[in-house]
Amino acid sequence: MVPEARQRIVEATYACIARRGIAKTTVEDVAREAGLSRATVYRTFPGGRDELVDATVAWATFDFFAKLYDRIQGAASLEEVMERGIMFAHRSILEHEVLQRVMQTEPDKLLPALTVESNRIRAGIADVLAPYLVDRGLAQGVDLRDAADFLARMVLSYISAPGRWDLEDPEQVARLVRSELLAGVVVPAAGRR
Amino acid sequence: MVDEDTVVPLVAPALSGPAASERSDQSPHRVRIIDGTLACLARHGSAKTTVDDIARESGVSRATVYRAFPGGRDEILGAVVDTEMARLFSALGVRLGNADDLGTALVGGIVVASTRLRDHVALHFLVEHEPGIILGHLAFADSDRLLSIASKFTAPFLARWMSPDEAERVAEWAARIVLSYAIAPSTHLDPCDEADATRLVTTFMLPGIEALRSAASGPIDITPYPADGPAVDPGEEPVTAS
């Protein structure tokens, strides 16, 4: 399998879904958009549209993580990594027009793929945070795997449903990070408490 | 002691509004029909459950079902959701109301809510076979609504130990924790388990609540990350544990 074909098909699927949603996107549409034959699309994605949707969600997630890594590069502390990450991630979800539209119009078509993907996203966030946690030093008796998983769960929860928190406001995000997220996890930073 | 059965009627109207509470005493069959519907949902899901199925399962006639729920299937399903929420909240209320300290209240609340979600057969059938119905409420804006309902109900119990604003934040936080582990169970932490829930509360929640409260009671020395660009502060080095 030529990797470029796969990539081209996934990007074509995304373009089709962005234009007319999941239900109205057929394998033919995707093939036409990608400039490939229907047979090639089926050879690459034997599962047809369902597999295409899954692959597209996975691709969009990967794209999101790539941008997130860029965003947290050079952060000077664990707190700053989390502040930058949460603000960026929340904004990305809010401003993701395709995600928002499909969630409004065809949630049942998107949610299964999104649920599978959210497990991977959670593991991804935990992997990003773990080295920062080790660097910073965990509070007494806190297990690294427990802490990274807990933080990933909470981050995922806040960025998709902020509840009472205004994640556009840097001061609120700073307060959130230092209370519900990190207070029990790491040793307090000198001069911060 | 607070009794669970006495709490249900108090909670249900609060969830569905006055219209439902006016109706709620009209038919003695309502609870029976709701429980019959739950059994149908647990077996066949929502799409395949008809009013006939519900009548048969509940052991009443079709006419009785419609007398109790003139709106038919949709009204019954709405009542099922309200009733199950009310049952969950009254179980929570009992546990929270009887707790002597904040830690016990949080552990009890998390264990009760997590266990009820874990053991809810109809809920699991729907998540598995008709994900759009349930998962839609757990994502994005609808999830916000669910968190808000959960925190509004549980916050008053926590306000014994903190201000109403703090209590609502903490209640919302606990609801997030319960939902997160219910949607995606963890292999190494089971919130239905008293010991695991205690570890969760004492390790992560109690210090977090203390930090929330000290931040609220006065200015806190924080250096928030500016919204419009990456923070460049060469003087700030990562602090490592010593």
Image: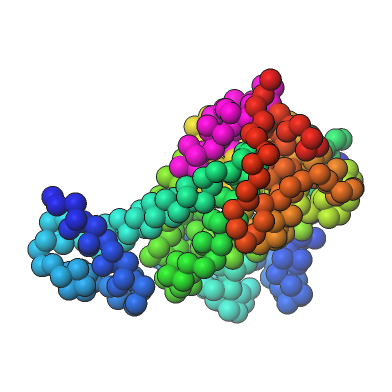
Residue at 70 percent of width and 60 percent of height: A169
User: Is A51 left or right of A176, judged from the image as shown?
Assistant: left
Residue at 73 percent of width and 77 percent of height: B19
- Relative height, residue B33 to residue A62 (above, below): below
Q: Quadrant of residue A28?
A: bottom left
| Magenta region | A124-150
Residue at 47 percent of width and 47 percent of height: A69
User: Is A83 left or right of B89, judged from the image as shown?
Assistant: left
Residue B233 lies, in percent from the top left, at 66, 45
Residue A143 on the magenta span: yes
Q: Which residue lies furthest to the front in this view?
A: B234
Q: In this view of the protein, can residue B44 be seen by the observer?
A: no
Depth check: give the residue in front, A125 or B144: A125
Q: In this view of the protein, can residue A24 be seen by the observer?
A: yes
- Relative height, residue B22 to residue A153 (above, below): below
User: Is A53 left or right of B180, judged from the image as shown?
Assistant: left
User: Is A184 left or right of B129, judged from the image as shown?
Assistant: right
- Relative height, residue B44 to residue B23 (above, below): above
Q: Quadrant of residue B209?
A: top right
Residue B214 on the magenta span: no
Locate the C terminus of chain A by quadrant.
top right
Residue A29 lies, in percent from the top left, at 21, 74
Q: Quadrant of residue B26?
A: bottom right
